[in-house]
Image (cartoon, helix red, strand yellow):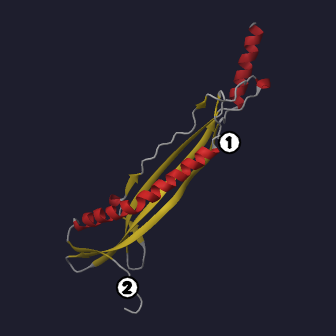
Amino acid sequence: MNTLKGALRVAAVGFILLCGSCFAQRVNRTDVVQSASRPVLVKFANGVTEKYVVEWSGTASILESEEGAPATPLSGHFIDDRRCHWKIQPVIQRKLYFVNRVGDRFAKEDLTTVYQVHFDNQGSEFMSLRLRSENCNDAEARFQSDVSDSHILVQQQFVNHTNADFQAVLNAIRGWNQVVKVTEDTPTKPGK
């Protein structure tokens, strides 16, 4: 009996050593779903006019990983305990840039903000009908569906959010010292 316990312990330790990377990261990326920018002219009391650009980027940060290992009965691991997890974080980020005369841009970090797009996802749960957890190959269709849903949510909220946020940015700039006028810089049409 002690020999069997010892052999099982050695097999378990061997499995743990062999499975040191049983948490495999499969996907780690950020998808840019939508972006927009709007130029702004800011006139100061001393007569100087400066150009700024407000940029928004709607993204989905995607992380998919799998933990566990397939069943290997000859090594003493009798259960396929692979489990797929993913986290998808859709956001809309705003940045304000000062643009100098030669076109170089400098971020005004105090007006950078991130708006979280509400999205629920958690990866797979234990599949009671199969009596095992769901690995990433089994869950691929649900994972891709969640990725697609996150992109759709960003697209649905992007225009309304950026329009409302643009007004908030203009109001913030109006609060700066010595600002007398803030306008959107609309490009002139050819021939005018």
Where residue 114 appears, as percent x and y from the top left, is 39, 54
What's the amino acid at mark 2?
Thr
How far apart marks 2 and 1 lie (CA) works out to 53 Å
Label 2: how many Cα within 10 Å (few below 14, some 14–19, many 20+): few
Any mark on residue 6, and which? Answer: none
Of residues 189 and 102, the one nearer the viewer is 189
Where residue 165 appears, as percent x and y from the top left, is 33, 61
Q: Residue furthest front?
A: 129
Q: Secondary structure at mark 1?
A: loop
Q: Residue furthest right?
A: 74
Of residues 130 and 188, the one nearer the viewer is 130
Residue displayed at 40% across by 93% down: 191
Q: Is residue 81 above or below residue 60?
A: above
Where residue 87 appears, as percent x and y from the top left, is 52, 44
Q: Is residue 8 above or below residue 19?
A: above
Q: Is residue 190 left or right of residue 84?
A: left
What's the amino acid at mark 1?
Asn
Q: Residue 185, located in which quarter of the rendered image? A: bottom left
The label nearer to you, 2 versus 1, is: 1
Label 1: how many Cα within 10 Å (few below 14, some 14–19, many 20+): few
Q: Quadrant of the C terminus?
A: bottom left
Q: Secondary structure at mark 2?
A: loop
Q: Residue 178, located in which quarter of the rendered image? A: bottom left
Q: How many marks?
A: 2
Q: Which residue is mark 2?
A: 188
Where residue 4 appears, as percent x and y from the top left, is 76, 11
Any mark on residue 137, and which? Answer: 1
Residue displayed at 35% across by 64% down: 163
